[in-house]
Image (tube, rainbow, N blue to C red):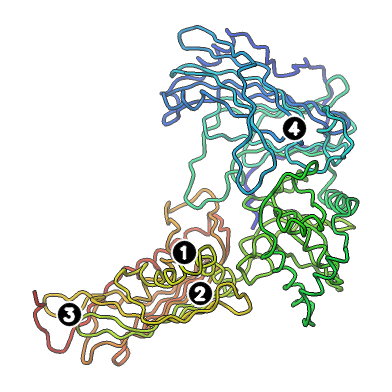
């Protein structure tokens, strides 16, 4: 579901011709006196309650060449308000990827509160590797040591950056100068500019100068700004300025900040279709999916004995998911979301999302299917402006009737799905020969992700509970259970079995366990546990038993830290959308046989709630049994603020029952023994 909040929509291609001074435009040669005046006007710690530092200004000046190459001069002034802020500003890190960008420190000055000024020697800047995990692409950072600071001190920093944000495809014969930073979509420029910060910002501005023959499109999201769009000395110059930004107050479980905070997106690409065609052509020109005899042989082996197309595609998809280890090694020019040859991925048996998607494309083609790569953004929304808002690569299977099916071998290890439903309500751009528009993946019905916990139990007069718990699941609920096992040694699996009950009551003892193999994806996850819990019910002074039905406590949910238990229900009203892992349907039932002749007090009223979270609950005393039936449906992955009250009401009602005790009273009462 796309969230549309008030935004400033700018006329695309509008040029206002009038003489202006080329500020070059933001005047980074400001004098010390001017900088001190700006710091004084910004205020002190009393002006920004709770903040450790303030960004006095952040000014960027971008010059774009006809080739699409951009050079950015950024001028910032930050002021420490507290000792913690002084520590934070002592070192500034400037990350960059040497394959696609370079960054230089032009100036760094410390303006001390006592009136002195210290200028940093450029030789003190340290160029070092970035900490990396799983993806080792030689990314680096430059550390700018401002040194020891005190509250009231300010740091001025001027940097020059050349290149582009994402590592795309570069030609192997490019010379080692700035021409190697020309974006692979030659002649095109884009930028994604966050106008938000973890610190308060007094002023932030962005100025870009482009040749007039470029169709620059831009839009501001989730905020308002002063905008200038003019002709200056034969070039189009756009300046966007925002003032007095305060950090957003985060809400538990909210969507990414980039989905709700102010940002500016610019591009010269015509539309998403043009980007789609380019992405397709780049991969085909590089022969990324060439079907070799080795790949053909492998595809035949994987699909041997299968007749249905869906079964063959599923087998190939899960082979790529389970047999290509997720690890990113630096393979030279073209890192980023450029797909590497499938033969390389097969040889290395490792790669990141683009490599897993790429080898799946090749295997599908080897098996006679039509297949292409696609791009998406996991965890964040992609806007309609056709800038490169991507961080993930997936696969497209196009059927003979021209309908398309999305496949994701990166996100489905241990899942029975072909496409992870944790990626529902997410934008995707398919790299088709004829091009494609941006699409949003549909909501996956809760019924596709069932978790069913059924308990048949008996309560003894002394409070001991014995019984059998059966658990079945499918979809992402199935995958969540398998993850508990697949991330551990098989010798540790019995401990995981025990946790399915001990998470709710540490006294639980398992007499027997039967469970499907978590590594076998052919059938839905299922397990059956025979258990005993001594003194499960508390014996009161009059001999009555006090307990909450085991099913209502959702022991499996406690073991998996399920969102129906863990997601915070605060605040009561939300400003921003809330995101969970996946839609789901939770069914809890228990038939509890009570001691003969007992009565039951404290049964809650039936519950019936509808909306974005639906909940049905009934606890009944039928004959000699207590029958508990609860069904909770979380209908989406991303819920708009207006959907939150209904979802919150369902979650709170569900959790209230998990803590609701009943009193079971025998026909003849006795005193609790000491």
CA distance for labels 1 and 2: 11 Å
Between disc 3 and disc 1, the foreground one is 1
Is 385 above or below relative to 434? above
Image location of residue 498, percent across then percent down: 39, 72
Query: In this picture, is 174 found above or below 542?
Result: above
- Locate the N terminus by quadrant: bottom right
The image quarter in which residue 45 lies: top left
Considering only vertical position in the picture, is 75 above or below 374? above
Mark before the other along the chain sequence, 2 or 4: 4
SS at circle 2: strand
Label 3, on which residue? 544
Badge 4 crowding class, 10 Å Cα cut-off, few under 14, some 14 to 19, many 20 or more, is many
Q: How many marks?
A: 4
Disc 3 element: loop
Find out whether the residues at labels 1 and 2 contact each other: C-beta distance under 8 Å. Answer: yes
Q: Earlier in the sequence, mark 3 or mark 2?
A: 2
Q: Which residue is mark 1?
A: 562
Mark 1 Cα-neighbour bin, 10 Å: few <14, some 14–19, many ≥20:
some
Disc 2/disc 4 C-alpha distance (Å): 48 Å
Q: Secondary structure at mark 1?
A: loop
Q: Is residue 195 left or right of residue 482?
A: right
Residue depicted at 68% across the width and 33% down the height: 96
Residue 341 location (% of width, % of height): 82, 54
- Which residue is identified by label 4? 101
* Marking on residue 451: 2
Alpha carbons under labels 3 and 1: distance apart: 33 Å
Decide if residue 503 is on the left or right side of residue 398: left
Circle 4 SS class: strand
């Amino acid at each position: 579901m796309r969230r549309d909040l008030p935004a400033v929509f700018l006329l695309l291609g509008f040029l206002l011709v009038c003489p202006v001074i080329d500020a070059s435009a933001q005047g980074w040669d400001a004098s010390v006196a001017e900088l001190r005046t700006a710091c004084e006007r910004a205020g002190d710690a009393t002006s920004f309650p709770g903040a450790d530092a303030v960004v006095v200004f952040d000014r960027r000046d971008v010059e774009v060449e006809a080739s699409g190459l951009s050079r950015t001069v950024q001028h910032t002034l930050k002021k420490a308000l507290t000792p913690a802020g002084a520590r934070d500003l002592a070192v500034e890190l400037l990350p960059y990827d040497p394959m696609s960008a370079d960054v230089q420190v032009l100036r760094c000055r410390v303006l001390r509160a006592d009136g002195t000024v210290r200028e940093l020697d450029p030789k003190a800047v340290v160029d070092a590797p970035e900490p990396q995990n799983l993806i080792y692409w030689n990314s680096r950072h430059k550390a700018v040591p401002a040194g020891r600071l005190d509250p009231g001190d300010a740091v001025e920093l001027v940097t020059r950056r050349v290149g582009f944000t994402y590592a795309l495809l570069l030609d192997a014969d490019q010379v080692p100068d700035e021409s190697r930073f020309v974006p692979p979509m030659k002649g095109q420029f884009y930028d994604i500019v966050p106008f938000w910060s973890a610190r308060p910002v007094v002023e932030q501005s962005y100025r870009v100068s482009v040749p007039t023959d470029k169709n620059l499109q831009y839009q501001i999201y989730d905020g308002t700004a002063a905008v200038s769009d003019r002709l200056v000395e034969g070039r189009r110059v756009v300046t966007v300025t925002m003032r007095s930004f305060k950090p957003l107050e985060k809400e538990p479980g909210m969507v990414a900040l980039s989905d709700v905070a102010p940002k500016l997106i610019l591009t010269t690409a015509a539309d998403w279709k043009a980007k789609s065609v380019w992405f397709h052509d780049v991969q085909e020109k590089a022969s990324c999916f060439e079907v070799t005899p080795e790949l053909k042989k492998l595809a035949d082996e994987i699909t041997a004995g299968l007749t249905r197309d869906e079964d063959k595609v599923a087998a190939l998809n899960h082979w790529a998911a389970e047999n290509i280890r997720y690890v990113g090694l630096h393979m030279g020019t073209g890192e980023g979301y450029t797909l590497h040859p499938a033969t390389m991925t097969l040889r290395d048996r490792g790669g990141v999302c683009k490599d897993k998607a790429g080898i799946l494309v090749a295997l599908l083609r080897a098996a006679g299917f039509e297949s292409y790569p696609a791009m998406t953004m996991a965890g964040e929304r992609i806007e309609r402006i056709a800038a490169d808002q991507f961080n993930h690569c997936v696969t497209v299977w196009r059927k003979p009737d021209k309908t398309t099916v999305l496949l994701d071998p990166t996100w489905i290890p241990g899942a029975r799905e072909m496409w992870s439903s944790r990626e529902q309500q997410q934008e995707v751009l398919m790299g088709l020969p004829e091009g494609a528009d941006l699409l949003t993946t549909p909501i996956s019905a809760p019924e596709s992700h069932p978790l069913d916990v059924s308990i048949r139990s008996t309560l003894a007069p002394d409070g001991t509970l014995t019984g059998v718990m059966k658990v079945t699941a499918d979809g992402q609920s199935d995958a969540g259970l398998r993850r508990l096992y697949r991330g551990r040694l098989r010798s540790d699996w019995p401990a995981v079995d025990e946790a399915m009950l001990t998470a709710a009551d540490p006294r639980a003892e398992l007499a027997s366990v039967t469970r499907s193999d978590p590594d076998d994806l052919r059938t839905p996850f299922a397990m059956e546990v025979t258990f005993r819990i001594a003194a499960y019910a508390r014996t009161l002074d009059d001999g009555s038993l006090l307990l909450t039905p085991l099913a209502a406590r959702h022991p499996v949910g406690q073991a998996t830290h399920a969102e129906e238990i863990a997601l915070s229900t605060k605040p009561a009203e939300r400003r921003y959308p809330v995101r969970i892992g996946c839609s789901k349907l939770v069914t809890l039932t228990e038939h509890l046989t009570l001691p003969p002749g007992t009565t039951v007090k404290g049964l809650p009223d039936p519950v019936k709630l509808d909306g974005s979270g639906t909940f049905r609950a009934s606890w009944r005393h039928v004959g000699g049994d207590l029958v508990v039936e609860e069904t909770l449906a979380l209908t989406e992955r991303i819920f708009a603020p207006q959907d939150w009250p209904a979802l919150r009401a369902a979650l709170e009602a569900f959790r209230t029952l998990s803590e609701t005790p009943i009193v079971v009273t025998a026909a003849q009462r006795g005193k609790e023994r000491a």
